[in-house]
């Protein structure tokens, strides 16, 4: 009897161990199933904003002007709520980080250190911030081409918002219209040429990692509507290279991004181009003149 009881106890002990192992396996499988069922990023919202010499609104700004503009920008920034934000005319990395403080989870991935140009004593930098981990991010100055050498350059960042789908983002700030029109146009067209060369190189570099999608945005300082730029090919060349334009079929009065003043009329100078994505919505965000002379632009895309 003792032997039988011992055998029975052994069998129970073994059964408990087997049950525990089975339950542990089931728990692991269930847990794995839960992990696999976690929501995958379906949409991505990208915004661009020329924040006008942030902080301060002008070169050599006083501390009071910096504080005033910072308060205005922080008040407006919450309207954007992007996953990725390209910024133009920030002074440096710290300024870019200050600009996005109101956006939870947003951090600066890259900020330029371009030298001052166009008769300026202080630089106007481009930067990209996001809520995604960046696979890589850097800036490049435009390559010299004599008199047509463009000022500044571009910021670039690569993200993987969903498995095996890469999103490659460019933030640009093309030549202003402060010089002779013909010279300004030639310089902007050169920027587009160099940008497309870089895009081809990135296609080769990242193509093996998954499906590629692209966003180019920022202040291009030109428009497809203004008769002054009727012969300019800066934007049309981008469209001819399989990029779509978020403002397609949007009335020009609904996409004015530059606040008009006594020096410059209102204009639609800020644009977003995309490839490999489906556009869901795009708009110009109404913001105060105290924040910037430009209004931010926002586009939401569906990821394939």
Image (tube, rainbow, N blue to C red):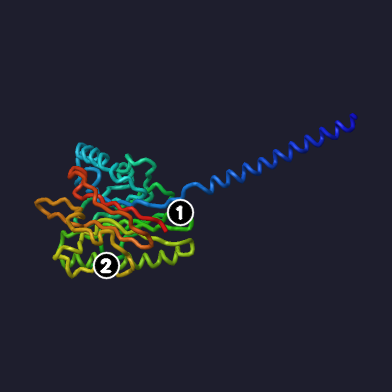
| x then y, percent, for residue 211 | 45, 62
Quadrant of residue 266 within the rendered picture: bottom left
In this view of the protein, which residue sits in the foreground, 295 or 180? 295
Quadrant of residue 190 within the rendered picture: bottom left
The secondary element bearing badge 1 is classed as strand
Q: Residues within 10 Å of mark 2 (few under 14, many from 20)?
A: many
Is residue 229 among the parts visible in the rendering?
yes
Q: Residues within 10 Å of mark 1 (few under 14, many from 20)?
A: some
* Quarter of the figure that contains the C terminus: bottom left
In the image, residue 111 above or below residue 203: above
In the image, residue 193 above or below residue 253: below
Q: Earlier in the sequence, mark 1 or mark 2?
A: 1
Q: How many circles with numbers are drawn on the protein?
A: 2
* Quarter of the figure that contains the N terminus: top right
Q: Which mark is residue 162?
A: 1
Residue at the spot of label 2: 190
Q: Name the residue located 86 percent from the left edge and 32 percent from the top edge.
A: 6
| x then y, percent, for residue 22 | 69, 42
* Residue farthest toward the top in the current orientation of the protein: 2
* Residue farthest toward the left in the current orientation of the protein: 262
Instruction: Give the spatial CA distance, label 1 vs label 2.
Output: 34 Å
| x then y, percent, for residue 221 | 21, 59
Left or right placement of residue 220 versus residue 243 in this view: left
| x then y, percent, for residue 43 | 39, 52
Q: Which mark is residue 44?
A: none
């Amino acid at each position: 009897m003792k032997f039988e009881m011992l055998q029975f106890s052994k069998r129970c002990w073994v059964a408990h161990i087997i049950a525990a192992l089975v339950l542990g396996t089931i728990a692991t499988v269930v847990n794995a199933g839960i992990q696999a069922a976690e929501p995958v990023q379906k949409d991505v919202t990208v915004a661009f904003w020329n924040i006008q010499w942030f902080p301060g609104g002008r070169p050599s700004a006083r501390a009071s002007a910096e504080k005033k503009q910072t308060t205005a920008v922080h008040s407006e920034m919450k309207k954007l709520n992007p996953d990725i934000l390209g910024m133009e005319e920030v002074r440096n990395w710290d300024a870019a980080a200050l600009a996005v403080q109101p956006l939870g989870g947003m951090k600066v991935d890259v900020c330029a250190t371009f030298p001052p140009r166009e008769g300026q004593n202080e630089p106007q930098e481009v930067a990209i911030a996001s809520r995604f981990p960046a696979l890589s991010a850097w800036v490049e100055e435009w390559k010299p081409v004599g008199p047509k050498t463009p000022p500044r350059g571009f910021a670039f960042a690569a993200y993987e918002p969903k498995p095996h789908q890469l999103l490659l983002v460019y933030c640009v700030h093309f030549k202003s219209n402060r010089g002779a029109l013909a010279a300004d146009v030639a310089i902007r067209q050169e920027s587009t040429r160099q940008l497309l060369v870089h895009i081809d190189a990135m296609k080769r570099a990242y193509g093996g990692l998954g499906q590629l999608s692209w966003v180019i945005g920022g202040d291009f300082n030109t428009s497809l509507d203004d008769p002054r730029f009727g012969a300019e090919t800066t934007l049309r060349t981008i469209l001819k290279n399989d990029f779509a334009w978020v403002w397609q079929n949007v009335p020009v009065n609904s996409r004015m991004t530059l606040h008009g003043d006594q020096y410059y009329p209102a204009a639609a100078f800020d644009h977003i181009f995309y490839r490999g994505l489906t556009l869901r919505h795009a708009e110009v965000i109404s913001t105060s003149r105290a924040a910037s002379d430009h209004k931010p632009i926002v586009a939401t895309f569906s990821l394939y």
